[in-house]
Image (tube, grey):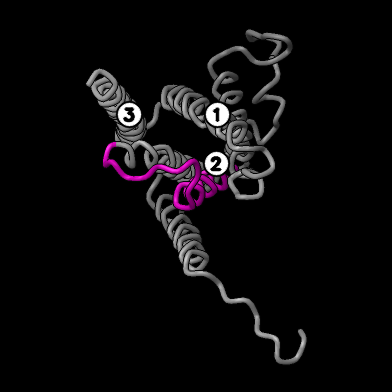
Amino acid sequence: MTPGRRRPEWSAESRRRLTRHLCLAGGSAAIIIAAALVLPGRINERFSLGSAYLALALLVVTLALGPLNVIRSRPNPVSFNLRRDFGIWSAVLGLVHTVIGLTVHFGGRLRMYFLAQPDGRSLLGLRADPFGLANHTGLVAALLLLLLAAISNDLSLRSLGTARWRWLQRWAYLILALTILHGGLYQVLEKQRAVLVALFTVLSLVVLAVQLAGVRRHRADSMRRVGAVTGRDSA
């Protein structure tokens, strides 16, 4: 570094984001470890479940932040750091769950998860039974989540343009649908305990309810604005 030249100082927002990422990392590790100590089964099953439910919870928060801004009549920008950070950690934990989850059955033989079996249903060489559908939807959801996390930055927003970037980010709703389908199938296939089924159901219903409330509030606000403009034009 050139003598006498000061290093650039971090902005307050950069420090807040660093603190938030550290809290999300530490909190996620603590929750997953606690779940692994409490849940039954082999160690990889426990870590798979812990990371799965936490990834879903963070996805719920990510998708709820925008509608909550609308409901509370607060500014709702195209992108903001709080939503980005929760989305990034949802993607990280989704990837962790995917990697660990693929070791739970069949000794980690990947072809058994995705490729058709001699005595099972198939479609284009892929498993078409509930187990295969659960794995296909989970894998696609994880890959899409990582894609959205990768473009959750100002550089991608400027490069893609607002319209295209927003279009890609709307894939988050497809991710939610795939995640709910993936998780719902595994609730049945693995005959999960009632408390885990209840947690999965509550998280799914919460995000759907918040999304619906945000849409209704947005429509009501739009109608009020149209009414106000119409009233001024007719005055």
Which image quadrant for residue 180? Answer: top left
Q: Is residue 42 visible?
A: no
Look at the numbered disc 2 and give the secondary structure of its residue.
helix
Q: Which residue is mark 1?
A: 171
The magenta region covers 71-96
- Amino acid type indicated by mark 2: Gly
Q: Is residue 209 above or below residue 18?
A: above
- Amino acid type indicated by mark 1: Trp
Query: Where does the image place residue 233, in percent across and percent down from the top left?
Result: 29, 21
> Residue 69 vs residue 63: left or right?
left
Q: Nearer the viewer, residue 169 or 111?
A: 169
> Residue 91 vs residue 188: left or right?
right
Q: Which residue is mark 2?
A: 94
Q: Which residue is mark 3?
A: 218
Image depth: mark 3 or mark 2 in front: 3
CA separation, marks 3 and 1?
A: 20 Å
- Amino acid type indicated by mark 3: His
Look at the numbered disc 1 and give the secondary structure of its residue.
helix
Query: Where does the image place residue 121, in percent across and percent down from the top left?
Result: 63, 8
Q: Nearer the viewer, residue 200 or 45?
A: 200
Q: Is residue 5 above or below residue 203?
A: below
Question: Quadrant of the image for the C terminus?
Answer: top left
Look at the numbered disc 3 and give the secondary structure of its residue.
helix
Q: Nearer the viewer, residue 159 or 141?
A: 159
Q: Nearer the viewer, residue 38 or 232?
A: 232
Q: Is residue 123 visible?
A: yes
Q: Most extreme residue toward the right, as rendered?
A: 2
Contact (CB < 8 A) between labels 3 and 2? no
Residue in view at x 70 percent, y 91 percent: 4
Query: Where does the image place residue 77, in percent across and percent down from the top left?
Result: 45, 43
Q: Most extreme residue toward the bottom, as rendered?
A: 4
Q: Earlier in the sequence, mark 3 or mark 1?
A: 1
